[in-house]
Image (tube, helix red, strand yellow):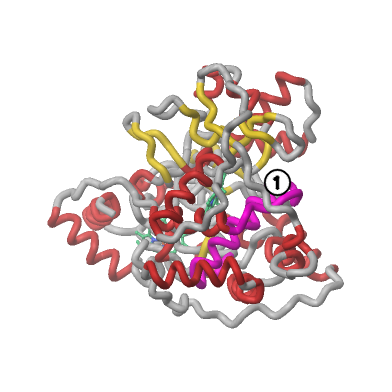
């Protein structure tokens, strides 16, 4: 079992010991994500503000952090958009990077950098540039991925898939800032998947076993690994990774990237208030520079392009299902679930972790914690298992069945009850069938 009480205790202790006064968190504006117009003209204008006005970036950062006292927020408040100091002084890096394929690697000499240095003048132009960033901008060198790609059978077994065009989405060969050619990972490694042989961008790569990929590298090469980290990586399993880089035990499921525009909050603990596209662009800008060990930063145009691309992603069509049953399920959902799952993506404002009752480690962790969880989006939810932020339940039947509350239950994490999110678990079986039909049509 996970040492939940230790995590909570560490959080409290850190809160007490930290000598810096915590800036007061912004006033809650759950209902009002200052509803931007989202027209092309507005997005282009907002893009210029983000790119050219450091004061706008700073204001956007401050008002987009749900709390100012977790380490995610502290790190950004201390370094971002300070103009004369901090991350603004990092050199922008526009890399040369090509997809990894099975073809023999050709030299990178003569390959043009990812971005031609021109700001797109249309939304479509930004989205296209964003796609290039999503597939090709290296978060960093990734020796584990390089190693896995040398053994195709092993690579497949940890979810490193080959797309119909022969590339391995999420893997690039690139010229690093030291001039050496390396293998790196990109957004597409975790946020694309194959479905019936076709590439679906935005769908979580639920077969990707990052922990096993890394452990295998250590086992094969003898490179040392901290035993505590190794133990944790073994526990992640496919589709989950601990991206908080703190000592809390809180691996999270990779989410689908559908309906981001509708969400009032980003990430499953709602670390970021989605006050508008600048919030997402800042998330991506800081993710990229942080992943690359704060040595360089992406040109901001690329972070903005990435945000525009993420907003453009759409889930594949879903089956309509039995109309009468779906309608009945929809009525039940409106009565009993809509209170929380209230926005157009099926997500909604944050709910106290104590009320949700699922594993509180992520919500209370000092990395990204807010004390709350975001109601999960319900777009293409039938295919979004395993469910909950930690991916602890394999199917919707498991989530809405009462069996998981008993200590003898065996879920994704092995034996033991999976508490929390009790809604729908005590319904009559015909109501539950209607609910499931409705959910499957989302
Ligand atoms: C190693 C796997 C991995 C890689 C690589 C990765 N992500 Fe993620 N991503 C995750 C996980 C896990 C989460 C969930 C984090 C959380 O909820 O706290 C996430 C969350 C997100 C979210 C928030 C979604 C939401 O519903 O709020 C966005 C947006 C996102 N990622 C975009 C990106 C982009 C863009 C890149 C490339 C720059 C990227 N990710 C690279 C694993 C990954
Ligand atoms: C009190 C608020 C609240 C109510 C009521 C509620 N939910 Fe949720 N729901 C949440 C939160 C918060 C999460 C995320 C919990 C987590 O990840 O730990 C969630 C997660 C889910 C998920 C998991 C999706 C995924 O991809 O992991 C589904 C499905 C879901 N809810 C459906 C429903 C349905 C159907 C109902 C009504 C029977 C309902 N919820 C009622 C707040 C609520």
In the rendered image, residue 273, in percent from the top left (x then y), is placed at 54, 69
Residue 96 in which image quadrant: top right
**Residue 307 visible in rendering:** yes
**The C terminus lies in quadrant:** bottom left
Residue at 51% in and 29% down: 160
Residue at 14% in and 54% down: 323
Residue nearest the observer in this picture, 255 or 164: 164
Instruction: Give the left or right position of residue 16, taking residue 342 as reference.
Output: right
Residue on which the image places disc 1: 292
- Mark 1, other Cα within 10 Å: few <14 / some 14–19 / many ≥20: some
**How many numbered tags mark residues here?**
1
Q: Is residue 179 magenta?
A: no
Compared with 307, 179 (above or below) is: above
Instruction: Give the left or right position of residue 299, taking residue 218 as reference.
Output: left
In the rendered image, residue 111, in percent from the top left (x then y), is placed at 57, 33
**The N terminus lies in quadrant:** top right
Residue at 64% in and 52% down: 298
**Residue 355 visible in rendering:** no
In the rendered image, residue 399, in percent from the top left (x then y), is placed at 40, 50
Magenta part of the chain: 272-300
Residue at 68% in and 29% down: 181
């Amino acid at each position: 079992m996970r040492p939940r009480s230790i995590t909570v205790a560490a959080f409290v202790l850190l809160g007490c010991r930290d000598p810096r006064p915590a800036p007061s968190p912004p006033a809650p504006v759950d209902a009002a994500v200052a509803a931007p117009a989202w027209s092309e003209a507005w997005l282009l204008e907002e893009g210029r503000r983000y790119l050219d006005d450091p004061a706008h970036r700073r204001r956007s950062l401050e008002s987009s952090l749900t709390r100012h006292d977790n380490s995610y927020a502290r790190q950004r408040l201390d370094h971002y958009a300070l103009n004369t100091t901090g991350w603004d002084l990092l050199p922008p890096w526009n890399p040369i990077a090509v997809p990894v394929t099975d073809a023999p690697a050709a030299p990178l000499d003569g390959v043009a950098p990812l971005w031609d240095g021109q700001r797109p003048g249309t939304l479509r132009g930004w989205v296209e540039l964003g796609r290039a960033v999503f597939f090709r901008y290296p978060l960093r060198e990734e020796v584990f991925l390089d190693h896995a790609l040398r053994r195709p059978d092993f690579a497949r077994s940890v979810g490193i898939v080959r797309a119909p065009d022969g590339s391995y989405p999420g893997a690039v060969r690139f010229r690093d800032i030291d001039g050496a050619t390396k293998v790196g990972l990109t957004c597409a490694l975790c946020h694309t998947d194959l479905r019936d042989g076709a590439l679906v961008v935005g769908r979580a790569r639920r077969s990707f076993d990052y922990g096993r990929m890394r452990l295998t590298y250590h086992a094969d090469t003898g490179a040392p690994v901290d035993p505590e980290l190794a133990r944790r990586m073994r526990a992640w399993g496919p589709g989950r990774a601990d991206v908080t880089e703190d000592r809390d035990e809180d691996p999270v499921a990779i989410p689908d990237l559908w309906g981001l525009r509708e969400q009032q909050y980003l990430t499953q603990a709602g670390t970021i208030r989605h006050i508008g596209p600048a919030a997402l662009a800042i998330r991506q800008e800081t993710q990229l520079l942080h992943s690359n060990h704060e040595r360089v930063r992406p040109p901001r145009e690329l972070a903005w392009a990435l945000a525009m691309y993420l907003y453009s992603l759409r889930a594949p069509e879903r089956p309509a299902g039995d109309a009468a049953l779906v309608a009945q399920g929809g009525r039940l959902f409106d009565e009993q679930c809509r209170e929380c799952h209230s926005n157009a993506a099926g997500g909604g404002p944050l709910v106290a972790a104590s009320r949700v009752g699922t594993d509180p480690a992520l919500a209370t962790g000092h990395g990204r914690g807010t004390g709350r969880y975001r109601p999960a989006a319900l777009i293409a939810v039938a295919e979004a298992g395993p469910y909950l932020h930690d991916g602890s339940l394999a199917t919707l039947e498991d989530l809405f069945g009462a069996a998981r509350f008993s200590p003898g239950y065996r879920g994704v994490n092995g034996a033991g009850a999976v508490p929390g999110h009790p809604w729908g678990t005590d319904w009559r079986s015909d109501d539950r069938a209607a609910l499931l039909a409705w959910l499957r049509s989302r």
